[in-house]
Image (tube, coloured by chain):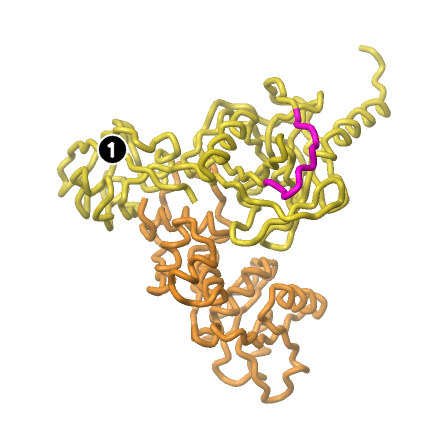
Chain colours: A yellow, B orange
Amino acid sequence: MSSFDLAAFSDAVAGIAEKAAPLTASFKTQHGRTATAFHWGNGFYVTAEEAVEPDEEQHLTLASGETMSAELVGRDPSTGIALLKPERDAASPALEKADPVRPGHLIVAAGRDGASPLAVLGTIGEVGPAWRSMRGGVIDRRINLAVMAGGRFEGGPVLDAKGHLVGVLLFGPRRRALVIPYETIERTIAALKSKGHVSRGYLGAGLQPIRHGGVQGAIVMSLDEDGPAKAAGIVLGDIVTAWNGEAVRGPRELIRRLGPDSAGASVTLGVLRGGEAREVAITIGEKPLT
Amino acid sequence: MVARHDSDESLLALVALGDGGRGERLAASLAELGDIIALTSEDIGPGGHAEVAIVSDIAVVKSLPTGTPIVLLSDPGGEPITHSSIAAALRADADPVLIAAAARLAAAGYRITKGAAGASDRPPSDAASDSDESEVSLPIHLSPREAEVLALLAEGAPNKVIARRLDISVHTVKFHVAAILVKLGAANRTDAIATAMRQGLVLV
């Protein structure tokens, strides 16, 4: 093994951070903290949906030090991504897409807090297959980080050793840092740019979890008179226990299936009515995901 | 009680924490959030009036007029304290936003029971709690107005739009939204809608 030059390694890490710094912006979150956004391309900035207070006017502090108002183009709670467009195009470049990462690969998470660029070194902690978020969004790869990134890094870019973009940093349960990968961002912002929102599947039913004896499911407590559930013949008190033959143990699992890709789909729900199992064919409706 | 919040009158809150420095920091945070004036025991003086008291030690209550609602900030692991005037109990390190919301609710006569306020560190949206369908046990009671606000929140309406639709002030909308977040143990609006969907409060 050739000799390891710590100073050169250190400079290489700082170089990655330095290259990303002009693309980062910071903004105030709803609890008076700051979070990061970064330039995606053509004047659009990507950040974490959870950090953006949808009701307030957005202000981004760009790398130039300028603070300017920004339009919230749209937000997608199902993938955790929000898209902002500051009023003036900073004309910064875009980051290149990273090659697939493996556990153990070094990453640099970049961020910004006002005038200060931020950086932290870590590794890819876990790489897994596509997964579905709690609001039904399909996340193309599961990427968890082993990195000591504080709240200011939320919404910031995660870069590989070449300085290419792995994805955006978000916090999952127990503030575990995870990455929403490049291709998921790409897909989401295409939808946000065209419609301003993403859709969710809609049943038109108020559901509560129920567990009684061996039965576990989502019991229908209320119905939208004009909704798909009502149209499909679902009645109050029905317990939804399956979605296309796969068990659904409660509202949480049902909601997870009602992601953007479910809108308009034909689905067979397994339903218990008065203790009798039956199947109900339903065409899933569509609502804006908020 | 809603009428009071329609006027832009500030809430007078006594902040008396055992640790003076912590009290000052909380008072500053509350002042920054707006419409809460944090007072110390000296500011109020004997027999003075506060609409709500934020305390770390229940003994302070003796110096207050009977019935002043109390938001108790206790250290985790401490002895559980029960007192008829305690309207809400939060951890000492709770977010000032949450403390402010609890103080407003307490002053308005609400009592926040454990299940609701204690659930705030529930994980946000992710797959980890896949099989956890166990939220059955927490009945959540929203006022009719809160239910209306929640329905509009779920449609993605910003505060201004909700205010216009319900013909109330934006200030009052913010008050209702804060109450909804506390009752649902939600960290933000998105989280509140997700929880409400799982609890049958918003149509799925």
Circle 1 crowding by C-alpha within 10 Å: few under 14, some 14–19, many from 20? some
Q: Residue at x 45, y 28 (%)?
A: A131
Question: Which image quarter is the C terminus of chain A in?
Answer: top left
Q: Nearer the viewer, residue A1 or A278?
A: A278
Within the image, what quadrant is residue A200 found in? top left
Q: Main secondary structure of the magenta part?
A: loop
Within the image, what quadrant is residue B72 found in? bottom right
**Drawn side of residue B184 relative to residue A218, left or right:** right
Q: Nearer the viewer, residue B106 or B148?
A: B148
Q: Is residue A93 magenta?
A: yes
Q: Nearer the viewer, residue A45 or A193?
A: A193
Instruction: Say which element carries label 1.
Output: strand
Looking at the image, residue A189 lies above or below residue B6: above
The image shows residue B38 at horizontal and vertical percentages of: 63, 73
Mark 1 highlights which residue?
Answer: A283
The image shows residue A234 at horizontal and vertical percentages of: 18, 41
Q: On what subunit does the disc labeled 1 rest?
A: A
Looking at the image, residue B174 lies above or below residue A136: below
The image shows residue B124 at horizontal and vertical percentages of: 49, 44
Looking at the image, residue A266 lies above or below residue B174: above
Q: Nearer the viewer, residue B22 or A281?
A: A281
Instruction: Report if residue B171 is visible in the image.
Output: yes
**Drawn side of residue B139 relative to residue A177, left or right:** left
Question: Which image quarter is the N terminus of chain A in?
Answer: top right
Looking at the image, residue A159 lies above or below residue A241: above
Q: Residue at x 28, y 35 (%)?
A: A284
Type of the residue with mark 1:
Thr
Give, as a single range, the part of the protein colored magenta: A85-95
Q: Residue at x 43, y 69 (%)?
A: B111
Q: Residue at x 36, y 42 (%)?
A: B133
Instruction: Report if residue B115 is visible in the image.
Output: no
Residue lying farthest to the front in this orientation: A88
